Amino acid sequence: MASNKKKTGNRKTSTPAARPPHAVVIGAGRMGADIALAFALGGWHCDVVETDQGARERASSHWRQDLKRLRASRAISLLQMHAEAEKVNWKQADLAIECVFEDLQMKRKLLKSIEPRMRRDAIIATNTSSLRITDVASALKDASRAAGLHFSVPSHVMLAVEITRGGRTSDDTMKQLTSWMTDMGKVPIVINRDVPGMVINRIQHAMYREIYHLIDEGIATVETIDLAVRFGFGFRYSILGPIVSRDIHGLPIHLAVSEQIYPTLHNGKVPSKKLRQLVKSGHHGVRTGRGFYQWDPKTIGSRLTHFTELLEDTLKRVKRRDQPTEF
């Protein structure tokens, strides 16, 4: 499919200099709540729409706790929670981003409903992690202002944000999103071809397919694989990317190993048997107390907080945000 790189001409997507930028996040689940937090820490005003009362309460508690821990409690004034979309002043919004469940029809319906509420120069984004941007934006009258804006959790810490061009996304939209993310201190990952999963999830799930195959076949245990990745190749990746690491180790040996291993790698088209069994049995991970591992509900909250703190400490050591290495 050919990318549409035609400029929109009359439509400007720049934010007025007289006021801070303004975002609307639709959905305050774990992802949406954390994306809103990232915007507030970046100096944005952020309205959040969530119809579920429990989700609203959890998100508000999450914001207060994290902002207190980060000594940024004043940023809470930039966050406004709403139970209904009608409560939002949509004409103030420079950007709206949907963070609802990964369901194509739900996302299409949602974007179609907010489009007439927004200024014509505002951008509409989807945080989808697997769907094609073109498909999600197909119900919009003006899809030139729609793009993918995919964050990772925890969004206030993780630097990479994938900015994906849909079939009708304009250059102006891509440039504005890239500028906004750079100004927030993020690392824009600009993707000019609309493929399911973008870049990060395609790479991750290629790895997970092989990992789950090794588990299903009894070749390695869950614990063995986690140790192998954490203390093997994963140990390097906060200071360099995977391609530059191959240059360092030498391409001839990499090619020779690839020729031996590639024919033996798993290429299945369906998810792992073990993964499907766990989900079917209601073992969904930390939320239910069991996934591949057992999780103690008494300690999981403090452990996840410590996990975030460790990531924040790692973030402090990242100096070269526009380079593939720290050296």
Image: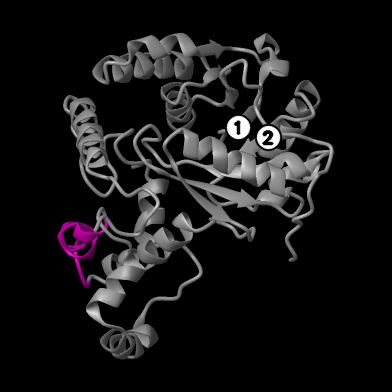
Element carrying mark 1: strand
| Residue 185 position by quadrant | top left
Residue for point 77% across, 33% down: 112
Question: Which disc is residue 245 wearing?
Answer: none
- The vertical placement of 198 against 57, above or below, is below
At label 2, the amino acid type is Ile
- The vertical placement of 239 against 218, above or below, is above
- The vertical placement of 254 against 325, above or below, is below
Residue for point 27% across, 40% down: 315
Residue 19, given in percent of the width and then of the height, sits at 60, 16
| Residue 266 position by quadrant | bottom left
At label 1, the amino acid type is Ile
For residue 44, side relative to residue 251 (left or right): right
Residue 222 appears anywhere in the view: no
Magenta residues span 219-237
Question: Which disc is residue 97 wearing?
Answer: 1
Pointer 2: what residue? 124
Q: Residues within 10 Å of mark 2 (few under 14, many from 20)?
A: many
